């Protein structure tokens, strides 16, 4: 458990949210469709509690990383360097202690908004991320922690500091309920070298394949997978992978390879391989010339959305920036709710391809 100033009790944060929402009770949120808030996000999340508690299936957030910088947009390009025609996108200058209290309150509200099958992906850097992990363990429960994804964000940098280079940041992935989170089991295709290694044989039609035995470890005493197939006994300590009747079908389809001494093996074709499990080190470099500072890689966001939401899910990003997550949610046919307090961000989101939405601007 982490202690910091202004770490209010869970119930007090919810009470503060309720009071905040009451003072804006003239604002009615739509039941359906996308929503874009130009607003401070504690306020927007408070307003959402009445209609959207336990209804959001996926939250992706990329809060300011506590970088002690101002971010600008000049001549349609994002940067951190002052220039004559600059306009400020946002400021990221909160001291750590204040930042933790800021995140604590917002994460409590996000937890309230997530459905039982919901997930949170929180994008952060390693300077601040470990503190946030402790906070998230407290709010979500350590059992609901799923992954700390290392994301390779850039090409290696030649920093002059006396330390290793830094080409990654982290995405903390939590489920509201670790047994129920939406998981579409999206897999990754093999790369060419892996295909060649895994499928070294080529058949007469040019298809790459490998072969595996018909049997697997473990004996079945009386079951069908322990009985002889075409007078071939299953080797001791093993059982047929499937009902031997299936082998007749495979053989008829040319999917069994017989060795010269009559040993059968199942053919597994590269073009039928369903892909490999995606691991927790990702390479998704951010756009080289982003339209907004810290605009994130769209393919990465699409992967998160495709993996952890359904077609009728609502995706929330309450630190929306350029609206990259909203663009991707829209492209994948998901409903979305976006929040940002920066005028520059809202302008860019509105120019982006995010589909139709209700726009709500609230000043606090
Ligand atoms: C790191 S950027 C997000 C970039 C975004 N993921 C993208 O791909 O474009 C963080 C954003 O959070 C917004 N922000 C920071 N504090 C906020 C707050 N309290 N309420 C609403 N937006 C906030 C900033 O204006 C900024 O646009």
Image (cartoon, grey):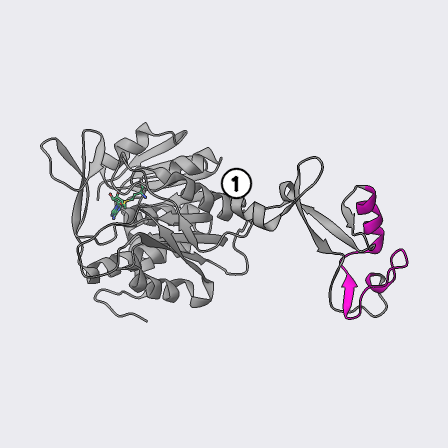
Residue hosting label 1:
312
Q: Is residue 339 magenta?
A: no
Tell me which corner region of the image, top left, top right, bottom left or bottom right, holds residue 226.
Answer: bottom right
Name the side, left or right, on which 275 lies relative to 170: right
Residue 75: name its quadrant.
Answer: top left
Residue 64: give x, y in percent of width and height: 25, 50
Tell me the SS state at disc 1. loop
Residue found 36% across the figure and 41% down from its top: 297
Residue 115 shows in this picture: no
Can you tell me which quadrant of the image ligand 1 is in?
top left
Percent across and percent down for residue 329 are 44, 38
Residue found 57% across the figure and 46% down from its top: 195
Q: Is residue 9 above or below residue 159?
A: below
Question: Which of the image's four quarters has the C terminus?
Answer: top left
Viewer-closest of 268 and 288: 268
Above or below: residue 138 compared with residue 356: below
Q: Nearer the viewer, residue 66 or 263?
A: 263
Question: Does 233 appear in magenta?
Answer: yes
Left or right, 211 with reference to 81 = right
Label 1 CB less than 8 angstroms from ligand 1: no
Q: Which residues are magenta?
A: 225-252
Instruction: Give me the residue at 77% from left, 67% from top.
Output: 238
Residue 295 x/y as whole percent: 30, 40
25 left or right of 120 in image: left
């Amino acid at each position: 458990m982490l202690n910091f100033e202004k770490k209010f009790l869970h119930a007090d944060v919810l009470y503060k949210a309720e009071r905040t929402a009451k003072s804006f009770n003239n604002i009615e949120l739509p039941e359906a469709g996308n929503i874009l808030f130009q607003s401070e996000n504690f306020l927007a999340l408070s307003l959402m509690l009445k209609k959207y508690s336990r209804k959001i299936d996926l939250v992706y957030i990329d809060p300011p990383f506590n970088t002690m910088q101002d971010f600008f947009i000049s001549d349609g390009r994002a940067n951190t360097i002052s220039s004559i025609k600059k306009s400020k996108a946002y400021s990221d200058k909160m001291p750590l202690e204040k930042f933790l209290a800021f995140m604590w309150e917002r994460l409590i509200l996000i937890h309230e908004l997530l459905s039982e099958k919901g997930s949170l992906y929180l994008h952060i850097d390693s300077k601040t991320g470990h503190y946030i992990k402790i906070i998230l363990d407290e709010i979500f429960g350590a059992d609901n922690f799923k992954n700390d994804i290392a994301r390779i964000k850039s090409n290696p940098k030649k920093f002059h500091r006396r330390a290793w280079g830094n080409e990654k940041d982290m995405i903390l992935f939590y489920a509201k309920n670790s047994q129920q989170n939406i998981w579409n089991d999206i897999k990754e295709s093999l790369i060419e070298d892996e295909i060649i290694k895994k499928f070294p044989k080529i058949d007469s039609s040019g298809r790459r394949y490998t072969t595996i035995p018909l049997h697997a470890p473990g004996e079945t005493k009386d079951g069908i997978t322990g009985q002889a197939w075409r007078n071939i006994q299953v080797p001791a300590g093993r059982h047929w992978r499937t009902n031997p009747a299936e082998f007749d079908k495979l053989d008829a389809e040319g999917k069994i390879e017989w060795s010269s001494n009559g040993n059968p093996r199942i053919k597994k074709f590269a073009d039928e391989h369903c892909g490999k499990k995606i691991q927790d080190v990702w390479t998704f470099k951010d756009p080289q010339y982003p339209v907004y500072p810290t605009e994130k890689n769209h393919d990465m966001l699409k992967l998160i959305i495709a993996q952890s939401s359904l077609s009728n899910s609502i995706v929330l990003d309450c630190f929306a920036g350029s609206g990259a997550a909203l663009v991707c949610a829209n492209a994948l046919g998901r409903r979305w709710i976006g929040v940002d307090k920066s005028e520059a961000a809202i302008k860019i989101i509105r120019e982006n391809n995010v589909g139709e939405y209700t726009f709500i601007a609230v000043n606090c």
